[in-house]
Amino acid sequence: MVEIVQEKKQFDLFCKIKTYSHSKVYPFHWHENYEICQVINKPCAFRIDGELIEANPGDIVAINEQTVHQFIIHEEDTEIRVIQFNSNILFGITDRILDLKTHIRNPEIEMKKELKNNLEALLNLMEHEENIDNSDDNNYYKAITAALYFLLQQNFSATEKGVSGKSTKSDFYRIVEYINEHYTESITVNSIATHFYFSRGKLSSVFKKYAGVSINEYINQLRIKNANKLLLQGHSSTSAALSSGFESIRTFNNCYKRIMGMTPGEYVKSR
């Protein structure tokens, strides 16, 4: 179960090789910064604007600003180098920032010897990742990150996005914010469509495009997550269900078993 959220904490620059666990569900989120991820040791996946990308060691996944994404880990102790930076470190060098191609496969890098060597040289300069943080004293690493970005842009720039794409993504952010605030209430696809003056079809299409799941499925996941919290606080199943937005205990039980693979009572015992 995943809640879609906006990541509030922002870095001018962050770089670290992070170890991810297969047993953990990582948040589905977006932020203002650009993010470049290099898969180090094991295959994993990324869901980006609703598209599932399977990445292998050596692949680079570019996550452009305001892009909804999630890390999906297949194996324990998966290492990913994460470089997250604010676009302001590129200002003064260029006045036109182009988005990068989302999935840059390692074979694409390997076939360009000069690119591969330059890329490896820049990443080697950033090998002491623990020293790269949000400090104002990391201009050295900011320059390296800018060089890395422009090297990738020169070889793997994305097709420019139209205004309509930006508009639908803005709609998606507003829909998610509304659902996150009101999911415990009696909201439905129809009521949300009415709130935003969208047709039911447009609303469902925009949400599924970026989230990869239907609105009803997302609302149910939020409600189950909230019910679990209440169950562990001692609430009865009926109280937890109604307080989380379910209209009946029967609907709650059916939904709970489908999503959790167990009954509410079994969940409480397991915890």
Image: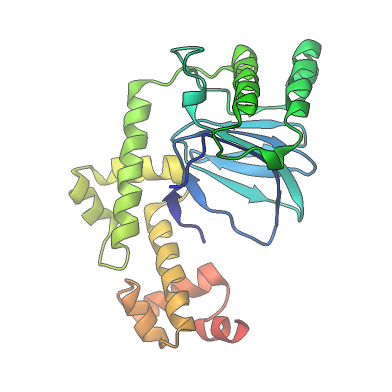
* 203 sits left or right of 226 in the view: left
Q: In the displayed structure, would residue 11 be above or below residue 62?
A: below
- Image coordinates for residue 139, horizontal then vertical, percent: 59, 26
Q: Is residue 180 above or below residue 40?
A: below
- In the rendering, at what x and y percent does residue 151 appear? 65, 16
In the picture provided, is 173 more to the left or to the right than 54?
A: left
Q: Where is residue 98 drawn, in percent x and y?
A: 49, 18
Q: Quadrant of residue 106?
A: top right
In the image, residue 212 above or below residue 145: below
Q: Position of residue 13 (x, y in %)?
A: 56, 34
**Quarter location, residue 102:** top right
Residues 30 and 118: in front is 118
Q: Which quadrant would the C terminus be assigned to in this image?
A: bottom right
In this image, 138 relative to 234: left or right?
right
Q: How many marks?
A: 0
Residue at x-position 65% and y-position 22%: 144
What residue sits 52% from the left and 69% below the top? 258
* Left or right: 223 as drawn, with respect to 107: left
Q: Is 140 in front, or is 48?
A: 140
Q: Nearer the viewer, residue 88 or 185?
A: 88
